[in-house]
């Protein structure tokens, strides 16, 4: 091999060695880039997974809260229904009392709400028709002072009575009495039912 061929061979060998070194360096850098990208992708995936878990936990808590609220509302509605039903049954039981017991209860009620002076008690059509004949006398005998007369004109009430002293009128109907005592009755019903 001549001198020129050796020089060319040396140049080619040097070039091949340099190409090999550059290729190895490029592969090393590519491996580093791939590893860094993989680590970054892993980190991003873990972050996304953590975010998804957080959102899932928040949605679960929200759903549980909504379910608890719906359950409480449903329970409250059922309690309200039961209390309304109990109140309605109590009113009906009072209305369905035998006439003597019903008017004894109304007599006690009239005594409780009676005032001094002359007054008038007004019954609805149904009660006026079945009113015991001695009711007015029994009522006035039980009052310490004043007198109450039974009106022969029916009042616009279903049951119970209106007690009037001039322009002042006391509503003693079953509905009005239950309405006046509604909170206390509901508290008692709540204690009994729940």
Image (spheres, grey):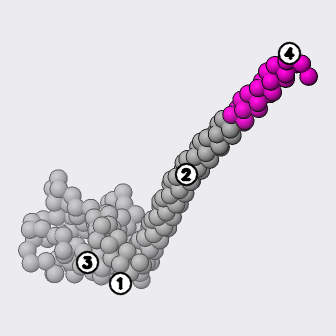
Asked if 144 appears above or below 72 in the picture, the reply is below
Viewed as shown, does residue 119 lie left or right of 33? left
Graded by Cα atoms within 10 Å as few (under 14), some (14 to 19) or many (20 or more), the crowding at tag 1 reads few
To which residue does mark 4 refer? Answer: 4
In front: label 4 or label 1: 4
Q: How many marks?
A: 4
Q: The N terminus is located in which quarter?
A: top right
**Relative image position of residue 120 (x, y in whole percent):** 21, 64
Q: Quadrant of residue 116?
A: bottom left
Q: Which residue is disc 2 drawn over? A: 50
Out of 114 and 182, give the one closest to the viewer. 182
Q: Nearer the viewer, mark 2 or mark 3?
A: 2
Distance (Cα) linking label 3 and label 1: 10 Å
Which residue lies under the disc numbered 1?
101
Q: Is residue 191 magenta?
A: no
The image shows residue 152 at horizontal and vertical percentages of 31, 64
Q: Residue at x 21, y 68 (%)?
A: 149
- Which residue is label 3 attached to? 107
Label 2's element? helix
Q: Earlier in the sequence, mark 3 or mark 1?
A: 1
Of the image marks 2 and 3, the number of the one nearer the N terminus: 2
Question: What distance separates the C-alpha of mark 2 from that of mark 4?
Answer: 68 Å
* Residue 95, visible in the rendered structure: no
CA separation, marks 2 and 1? 74 Å
Q: What are the residue bounds of the magenta stretch?
A: 1-27
Residue 178 percent across, percent down from the top left: 33, 68
Q: Which label lies toward us, 2 or 1?
A: 2
- In front of the other: label 4 or label 3? 4
Q: CA distance from mark 4 to mark 1?
A: 141 Å
Quadrant for residue 157, please give it: bottom left
Q: Can residue 107 be seen in this snapshot?
A: yes
């Amino acid at each position: 091999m001549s001198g020129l061929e050796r020089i060319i061979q040396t140049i080619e060998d040097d070039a091949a060695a340099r190409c090999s070194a550059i290729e190895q360096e490029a592969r090393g850098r590519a491996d580093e880039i791939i590893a860094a990208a993989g680590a970054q992708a892993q980190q991003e995936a873990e972050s996304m997974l953590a975010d998804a878990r957080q959102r899932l936990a928040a949605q679960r808590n929200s759903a549980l809260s909504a379910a608890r609220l719906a359950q409480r509302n449903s329970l409250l509605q059922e309690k309200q229904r039961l209390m309304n039903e109990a109140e309605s049954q109590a009113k009906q039981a009072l209305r369905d009392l035998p006439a003597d017991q019903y008017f004894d209860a109304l007599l006690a009620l009239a005594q409780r709400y009676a005032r001094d002076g002359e007054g008038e008690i007004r019954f609805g059509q149904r009660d006026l028709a079945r009113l015991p004949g001695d009711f007015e006398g029994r009522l006035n005998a039980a009052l310490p002072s004043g007198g109450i007369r039974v009106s022969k004109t029916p009042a616009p009430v279903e049951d119970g009575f209106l007690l009037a002293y001039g322009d002042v009128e006391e509503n003693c109907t079953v509905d009005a009495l239950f309405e006046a005592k509604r909170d206390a009755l509901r508290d008692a019903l709540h204690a009994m039912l729940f």
